[in-house]
Image (cartoon, grey):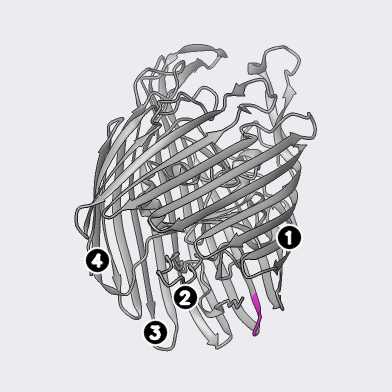
Amino acid sequence: MKRSILSAAIVMAASPTLAEEAPDSGAVTLEPVQVTATRLSQTVDEALASVTVIDREEIERLQPRQFTDLVEGRAGVSVSSAGPFGKQSSVRLRGTESDHHLMLIDGVRMGSATSGGASWRFLPPEEVDRVEIVRGPRTSIYGSDAIGGVTQIFSREGEEGPPRVNAFFGLGSFGTREAGAGIAGGTERTRYSLSLSRYDTDGINVQDDVGDDDPDGYDNTSLAGKLSHRLTNGLEFFGNVLYSEGRSEYDADESDPANPVDILGPYDRAYTDFVHAALRAGVRIPVTRHWDTEVTLGQSRDESDDVTEGGVLGGGVDRFDTRRDQAAWRNDVRVGERTDLIAGVDAYEDRVDGSTDYDEDSRYNVGVYSVLRTEIGNHDLEGSLRYDDNEEFGDKTTGQVAWGLQATDALRLRASYGTAFKAPTFNDLYFPGFGNPDLDPEESETFELGARYSASLAYVDVSVFETNVDDLIQSRCVVNCDDGNPDTDINEPRNVREARIRGLELEGGHDLGPWNSRVSLTLLDTEDRDTGNELARRPPVSARFDLDRQFGDASLGGTIRARSRSYDRGDNETRLSGYGTLDLRAAYELDPEWTVEGSLTNVFDRDYETQGGYNNPGMGAFVKLRYQQQR
């Protein structure tokens, strides 16, 4: 099978080649192109990693209410949340922690410097053009946080052609209202897009025994834009922004400052005002026919004001504002006909501001990396190496090697080994009265074997892996530990735990005539090596099945998600029951530009929890009118 890697087009914000259905003549379906696994532009078939791509067509077909609806139940992915609609969510890859999962937005590194995790809950699905999920360690390419893998979100971008307007308006259960509009287009040298969306819902009562009984609402206003311009000599300037702000309400009780066990009563209101943003600008320079270089500057912001009002003492505000300034220099070199090299330097500085006085409020990290890939006959070899210098914990070197074999035109085998690390957060290191500045990074090693079978209209991908994580950071009691009252314990984070995670992932799908399907299955065996317990909120079995059928101008579809029981805490005392849910959807093209969509979520009105004590919505109904101007 002939394969090619177009190094001149390798960019973090590159557009995917969308899967195109083969015509009746039997031509082979083109695989989606992804750039996240190695920073090389490759089809999913070519990647020596486990990769899932969700394109805009699939996003619109699935009609998600929130971003986590897109990824929940996918191979290797588990989601737990403190309720729906803008509430705290953890998205775990391959059984690792949520803060072991790196989020990128158009190449911008996201995440809170204080808590460490990414704000998945604030991502607006309507502004997302494509999602690439890469499972397995990627620290040797991207640095800290990528122990479990990387998910990159690409916002919408323009295509060559006259300006085209798009818009939508929707209503639904739980007092949900949403609307948005955008414009996109381009010329041979210039591409642009700009869109604005608003999501507003009254929500549900997230906790029954905490706070009041009123619904906990959520609103999100988002702006997304991309612009690029290429000069006649090939020099290209580009920029992108994704900005969201809004409010998410939650339940909270007021404690007596003198005795935290004594609850004075519920607050009148409790909510989080947030800002979540990714900005990037840069230039790509074709130095020679075989060498392209790219320089970028970026910034991510994760800001929140946690506000409580009323109560006996009148409430207050806890402000946590984190900013990450980023710079990168990257070089793509075609070494030979079948060998490609990427080498670069990236640096970022985290800054923390807010109502909490941290012992340190900034730190920098500089990383140098390289990725080499070559083809030898029907074998592929790939290696990556990275050196990080961090202001707090010093230096760290990570690496990864992978091998692939094109056994037949349809069957591809792969194997890999990689190391990774996760830097301690500002909360771990510097939180007043709690932080431990002597913490070491968490470290891991992962072994993986995989196979992918791709026919013209169907594919199956299976992988088995084992990840061992050392120096896991866990809070341990250091004062008042033996008085029998955990509420008076004083805890300190320490490097105390080791974990082993084994798993099997299966993903497949087909596009046959009017039928479209995707299926995912994940089997996990997790163990805290210190206690022998399962790791919290990791269901041993999870699955997802999406099935859609086109009937001329109409379509019908459904999604089944299921997961086995899990434990809410690491002591395995509190059990979360397994469950399954069914969502149904339909769409009808009124004409080539107007489409009406409708969906029923949680059709059987299942009562379930993914995090102990937090409710999820019952059955809901939603309708949306969508407009897409045609050329």
Q: Are marks 4 and 1 in contact (CB under 8 Å)?
A: no
Q: Which mark is residue 283?
A: 2
**Res 63 visible:** yes
Q: Give the range drawn in magenta.
A: 337-341
The crowding category of the residue bearing disc 4, from other C-alpha atoms within 10 Å (few below 14, some 14 to 19, many at least 20), is some
> Which of pointers 4 and 1 lies earlier in the amino acid sequence?
4
**Which residue is disc 3 drawn over?**
231
Q: Position of residue 84 (x, y in %)?
A: 42, 33
Amino acid under disc 4? Arg
Q: Do the residues labelled 3 and 2 touch (CB within 8 Å)?
A: no
Q: Which residue is drawn at 72% across and 78% down?
A: 377
Amino acid under disc 3? Leu
Q: Quadrant of the N terminus?
A: bottom right
Q: How far apart are marks 4 and 2 (CA)?
A: 26 Å
**Which residue is disc 4 drawn over?**
164
Find the residue positioned furthest to the front: 25
Q: Which residue is drawn at 34% across and 31% down?
A: 620
Nearer the viewer's eye, disc 1 or disc 2?
1
Query: Relative to 198, is 286 on the left or the right?
Result: right
Q: Which residue is drawn at 26% across and 54% down?
A: 553
Q: In this view, does 529 lie above or below 254?
A: below
Q: How far apart are marks 3 and 2 (CA)?
A: 11 Å
The front one of 481 and 314 is 481
Q: Position of residue 574 (x, y in %)?
A: 63, 21
> Which of pointers 3 and 1 lies earlier in the amino acid sequence?
3
**Which residue is disc 1 drawn over?**
415
The crowding category of the residue bearing disc 3, from other C-alpha atoms within 10 Å (few below 14, some 14 to 19, many at least 20), is few
The crowding category of the residue bearing disc 1, from other C-alpha atoms within 10 Å (few below 14, some 14 to 19, many at least 20), is many
Q: Is residue 396 above or below residue 468?
A: below
